[in-house]
Image (cartoon, rainbow, N blue to C red):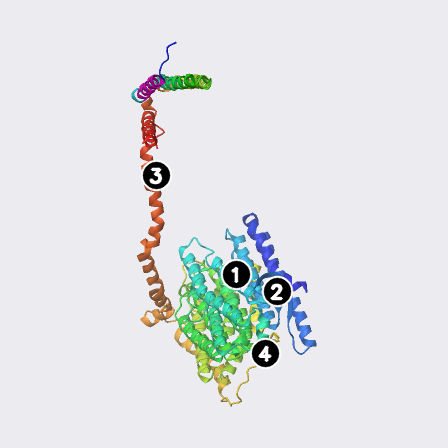
């Protein structure tokens, strides 16, 4: 199967062409190159998934397809290969990455049309797709780490794409540095894993868990360190602070990287290493805690945001929190399904938000919007479809996956009723902030200063419509994920019969609450952002940024200032001081006077002669 | 032929060398410096000839001829430079040529 070996390299080729010829390409040519790179990958992944599906139909247990390219390097006795592995889990991931990525590329082509660095933008997007495909297809953890760092790099490049604005460059740096903490933990986890199992091949590690499992202490540490990496990349507590600032990038970037694909890499990692996590139930419990706390905190922060993209960023964190919670509770299939459906509806939400921002002349404050339903009806309806999927409105894709997660929480051995309540509360908050956003943005009077100019390019609208279809129906795509995951046996306890109706009903109650609080009425004044200190606290992300600033950044800067004239520096300065001193001494001798030179020559000769004679 | 003691030859030679050297140091006029250099060269030449006659070898005189050739070449270049100097600066004061100071 050559399609598998070529799959990640199509976007790499188009990246190379775009970056080499960058400004010599006009818009049409660059668009064709960028879209065909990702499009070919998408076609290849459709073919591959079709084959995989056929194979899994014919045999009971699918081992997946492995394709080795070449040996990368030797690690002692262990051979690290550049090899790709496709099973239902990575199949879901490549389908999401290439499929959603392709639609977002199409949208981005229209969105970034006027930008002078258009080719560079599309090149970075292609490079991102390539790195993400390497991440999800990697057969061993070293190659996975390559993709992991690759997506981090692309994220940095794209957040800071408009680097002329200092704020964007700061946001890019912040994302890079914060995720770097997670990456370091992940690297440490890989070292420990190699030390214990003497291999980094994922399938070998997982196979070893049956015959000779890790010691419980080793499994505990490895699972914890891998979780650290996942937490950094997936913007979970406590390393989540970079994601809201990452919205400084162009909107298609937010859709592709910071909502649909890259931030789910942590979820993928934990799902992939499920065999290791099953050895450490404590850490699975911690995963569930991380997810549930993140989904609550992000939801509360989203309630007070004024920037449309920041609302969506916090909602992304919260939805990834659901995925983490699902993984922690052993609901792996539901969590990965939610990953997929979330990619559909969050990409849709971000892209429609991008269309609104484009029409509103890069105005992102929802309090300067309002009344958009009448002015941009198509975009508004698409946005509301996305919101419906986000709050798990019955019948949408989000409903299928989120209810599947919530439904397994109550009985799960590593979660339990407390987590169920947190997830339900999170769903309530999700619904509340979603409809706050909808009511303030789309209803009432238009409050912007500039006239709206909705764009009607087909590349802008076609991806949106396709994503809307996926957001509604995407939950019914067959995934075959049950083959990948070991089923966690739940104790056969009875769960109360009211669970499902509460889980379905509460988000709908929240819509009514949001209507009462936020709906702009005809006779009322314009909606304004809140003024209270609680509101401000919540808008600033519940003080995490301020805490980190006070605890880490400020002391570091102070220390750096203190240490500006440090001892080691003095040692280095001694060398330069030495050179300077001798230079000025030698300079004084070189007067340019010939007779003076002759006299010193004579004196020197006399001294020499005297020295010889005496 | 009267035998001249070798020490006398060397004393004359050293004296001439010192006179020449002091001339190089004391004069600011480049022409006189060149002339003083000639005196120094000839002092060395005298020492060679004296030494050659002491050991009855031709080497001393060969060295003197070598020095003579060298002096001729040196004067040729020196005078050419002197003419350029006079042409450009309208004087031949060697202290004026200190632009190369570091």
- Same subunit under labels 3 and 4? yes
**Does any portion of residue B90 appear in the rendered image?**
no
**Mark whose residue sits in front, 1 or 4:** 4
The answer to whether residue A603 is magenta is: no
From this viewpoint, which residue is outermost toward the top?
B1
The reply to whether callout 4 and callout 2 are in contact (CB within 8 Å) is no
Q: Residues within 10 Å of mark 3 (few under 14, many from 20)?
A: few
Closer to the chain start, of discs 2 and 1, is 2
**Which residue is the site of mark 3?**
A583
First in residue order: circle 2 vs circle 3: 2
Return the chain for callout 4.
Answer: A
Q: Main secondary structure of the magenta part?
A: helix
Disc 2 designates what residue?
A: A83
Q: Nearer the viewer, residue A272 or A515?
A: A272
Q: Nearer the viewer, mark 2 or mark 1?
A: 2
Label 2: which secondary element: strand
Disc 3 to disc 4, how far (Cα)? 72 Å
Q: For numbered disc 3, what is the local secondary structure? A: helix
| Residues packed near mark 1 inside 10 Å, few (<14), some (14 to 19) or many (20 plus) | many
In the displayed structure image, the side of residue A303 where residue A343 appears, left or right: right
Viewer-nearest residue: B48 or B94 = B48
**Residue A24 versus residue A587 in the image, above or below:** below
Chain letter, disc 2 residue: A
In the rendered structure, find residue A150 and report the number of the disc placed on it: 1
Q: Quadrant of residue B90?
A: top left
The mark found on residue A211 in the picture is 4
> In the image, is residue A138 above or below residue B4?
below
Kindly indicate whether the residue at mark 4 contacts the one at mark 1 (C-beta within 8 angstroms): no
- Label 4: how many Cα within 10 Å (few below 14, some 14–19, many 20+): few
Mark 4, secondary structure of its residue:
helix
């Amino acid at each position: 199967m050559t399609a598998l070996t070529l799959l990640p390299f199509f976007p790499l080729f188009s990246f190379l062409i775009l970056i080499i010829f960058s400004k010599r390409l006009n818009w049409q040519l660059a668009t064709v190159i960028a879209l065909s790179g990702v499009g070919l990958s998408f076609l290849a992944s459709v073919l591959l998934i079709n084959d995989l599906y056929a194979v899994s139909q014919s045999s009971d247990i699918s081992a997946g397809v492995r394709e080795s390219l070449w040996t990368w390097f030797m690690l002692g006795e262990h051979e690290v290969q550049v090899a790709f592995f496709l099973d239902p889990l990575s199949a879901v991931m490549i389908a999401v990455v290439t499929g959603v990525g392709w639609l977002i590329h199409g949208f981005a082509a229209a969105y970034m049309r006027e930008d002078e660095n258009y080719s560079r933008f599309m090149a970075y997007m292609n490079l991102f797709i390539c790195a993400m495909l390497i991440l999800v297809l990697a057969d061993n953890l070293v190659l996975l780490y390559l993709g992991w760092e690759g997506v981090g790099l692309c994220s940095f490049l794209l957040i800071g794409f408009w680097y002329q604005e200092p704020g964007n460059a700061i946001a890019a740096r912040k994302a890079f540095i914060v995720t770097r903490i997670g990456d370091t933990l992940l690297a440490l986890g890989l070292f420990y894993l190699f030390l214990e199992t003497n291999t980094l091949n994922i399938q070998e590690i997982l196979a070893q868990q049956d015959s000779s499992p890790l010691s419980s202490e080793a499994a505990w540490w490895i699972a914890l360190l891998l979780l650290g990496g996942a937490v950094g990349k997936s913007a979970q507590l406590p390393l989540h602070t970079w994601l809201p600032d990452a919205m400084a990038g162009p909107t298609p970037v937010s859709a592709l990287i910071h909502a649909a694909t890259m931030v789910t890499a942590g979820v993928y990692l934990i799902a992939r290493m499920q065999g290791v996590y099953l050895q450490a139930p404590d850490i699975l419990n911690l995963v569930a805690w991380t997810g549930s706390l993140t989904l609550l905190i992000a939801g509360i922060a989203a309630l007070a945001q004024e920037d449309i993209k920041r609302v969506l960023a916090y909602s992304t964190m919260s939805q990834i929190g659901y995925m983490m919670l699902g993984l922690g509770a052993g609901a792996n299939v539901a969590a990965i399904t939610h990953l997929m459906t979330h990619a559909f509806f969050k990409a849709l939400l971000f892209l429609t938000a991008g269309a609104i921002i484009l029409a509103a002349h890069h105005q992102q404050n929802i309090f300067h919007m309002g009344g958009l339903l009448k002015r941009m009806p198509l975009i508004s309806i698409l946005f509301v479809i996305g919101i419906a999927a986000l709050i798990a409105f019955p019948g949408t894709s989000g409903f299928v996956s989120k209810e599947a997660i919530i439904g397994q929480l109550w009985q799960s051995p590593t979660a339990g009723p407390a987590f169920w309540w947190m997830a339900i509360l999170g769903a309530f908050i999700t619904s509340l902030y979603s409809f706050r956003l909808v009511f303030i943005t789309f209803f009432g009077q238009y409050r912007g200063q500039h006239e709206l100019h909705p764009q009607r390019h087909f590349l802008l609208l076609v991806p949106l419509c396709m994503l809307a279809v996926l957001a509604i129906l995407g939950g019914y795509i067959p995934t075959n994920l049950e083959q990948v995951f070991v089923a966690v046996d739940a104790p056969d306890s009875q769960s109360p019969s009211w669970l499902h109706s509460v889980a379905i009903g509460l988000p709908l109650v929240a819509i009514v609450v949001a209507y009462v609080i936020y709906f702009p009425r005809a006779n009322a004044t314009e909606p304004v952002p809140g003024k209270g200190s609680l509101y401000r606290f919540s808008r600033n992300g519940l003080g995490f940024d301020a805490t980190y600033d006070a605890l880490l950044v400020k002391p570091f800067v102070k220390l750096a200032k203190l240490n500006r004239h440090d001892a080691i520096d003095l040692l280095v300065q001694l060398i330069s001081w030495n050179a300077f001193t001798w230079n000025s001494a030698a300079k004084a001798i070189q007067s340019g006077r010939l007779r003076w030179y002759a006299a010193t020559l004579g004196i020197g000769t006399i001294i020499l002669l005297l020295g010889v004679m005496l | 032929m009267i035998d001249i003691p070798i020490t006398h030859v060397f004393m004359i030679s050293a004296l001439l060398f010192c006179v020449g050297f002091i001339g190089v140091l004391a004069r600011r006029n480049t022409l006189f410096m060149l002339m003083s250099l000639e005196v120094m060269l000839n002092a060395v030449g005298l020492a060679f000839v004296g030494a050659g006659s002491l050991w009855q070898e031709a080497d001393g005189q060969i060295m003197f001829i070598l020095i003579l050739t060298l002096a001729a070449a040196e004067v040729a270049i020196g005078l050419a430079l002197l003419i350029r100097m006079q042409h450009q600066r309208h004087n031949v004061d060697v202290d004026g040529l200190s632009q190369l100071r570091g």
